[in-house]
Image: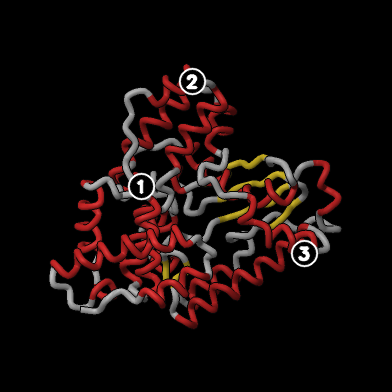
Amino acid sequence: MKSLDEQGFRRFLAKRNLTEKVVKAHIDIVREFEDHLKVRDRANGIEGATSVDFDDFLKIMVKEGKCSFDNMLALARYALFSNNKALTIHALELIDGADVMENLSKNLKQRVGEAKWREVFDGIELPPPGTHSRDKVKVTKILIDRLEAKLDKEKCREVLSSNLHYVPDEAFASSKKAFKGSENVDDFLEKRHKEYVEELAKHAKEKTLYYTQEVDDDVVEYVRNTPTCQVGVREGDVIYVTKIPYMAKKYLHEKNEKMKRYYYCHCPWVRESIKSGTHVSPDFCYCSAGFEKRLWDVIFGRPVKADVLHTVLKGDIVCKFAIHIPREHMASVGSCDKKKPK
């Protein structure tokens, strides 16, 4: 059986500037997974491990109290390092957005106080890391229904868009630097879109994963011809942004409208509701609006307003957001308005 390549994995992790403590913790949990595979007589080790192998080990981690976000991320990183694409995707899908509901709980309490927070979260047990998306929808529906019942629409949207992914300002340092080096907002957006297309083209050529999906030339062309995609196009004081489909290859070739919406959706807390027909309020997508606006919060040095214009949760086949440029920053926009993107 192939054994853990500790030195190679260390070099792989070195690119992420992790502390020695974190690196050691990564290696320790990978070794435990490796031992689990030995018991199951998996000759190819983690390189050949399947999603079933991972889920079986996940049950052991849950039983032993080791099913943490960090441990699952460690396993996902080793799967990526060992070029096990299927396992990488499976692991990342299980941890994607896993902390959103805990962050919603924290942010809600800060904004409305403990009494109102209890009215929303009372009696709710949040799913642990590793919970499949199909098992998250029930909790999502209960929470968003309670939020909308206990808060007015504006406050509800404010809480949902309050950076529930907890993306730090530092994550946008290079983008903020690039913005300062650009002529204006339009120049910045055009350069970002070109770089994004080039990034996807590189993944397509090298057959590497873009987060949890493989891309091909059709996906690259779709993004190339959709300037709002993952970047944005400005009209007046609004930047319009659409998301790249979560499973873009399947999305582009799917004819069934419901499945097309399913393949588009990024959110593990609501995606399965599209398949099941469970109604979840489209306002939950203000969580995604909060994610999309984080770049501009950092660039403009203050929270900006974002609106959900289209979402697959209300029958649209794309998710589209409006990011509002603060009035005091309008001097940084382009010299002329562009035609509103469709």
- Judge from the rendering whether residue 47 lies leftward or rightward of residue 255; answer left or right: left
Query: Which residue type carries mark 2?
Result: Glu
Q: Residue furthest bottom?
A: 205
At 22% from the left edge and 78% from the top edge, which residue is drawn? 44
Looking at the rendered image, the disc whose residue lies closer to the viewer, 3 or 1, is 3
Disc 3 and disc 1 in contact, CB within 8 angstroms:
no
Disc 2 and disc 3 in contact, CB within 8 angstroms:
no
Tell me how far mark 3 sits from mark 1, CA to CA. Answer: 37 Å
Image spot of residue 191 (x, y percent): 71, 68
Residue identifier under label 1: 274
Query: Which residue type carries mark 1?
Result: Ile
Q: State which quarter of the image contains the C terminus.
A: bottom right
Q: Is residue 24 above or below residue 240?
A: below
Image spot of residue 316 (x, y percent): 48, 49
Chain-order first, disc 3 or disc 1 = 3
SS at badge 3:
helix
Tell me how far mark 2 sits from mark 3, CA to CA. Answer: 45 Å
Closest to the observer, 327 or 219: 327
Disc 1 and disc 2 in contact, CB within 8 angstroms:
no
At 39% from the left edge and 70% from the top edge, which residue is drawn? 80
Residue identifier under label 2: 114
Query: Which residue type carries mark 3?
Result: Asp
Q: Is residue 57 above or below residue 329?
A: below
SS at badge 2:
helix
SS at badge 1:
helix
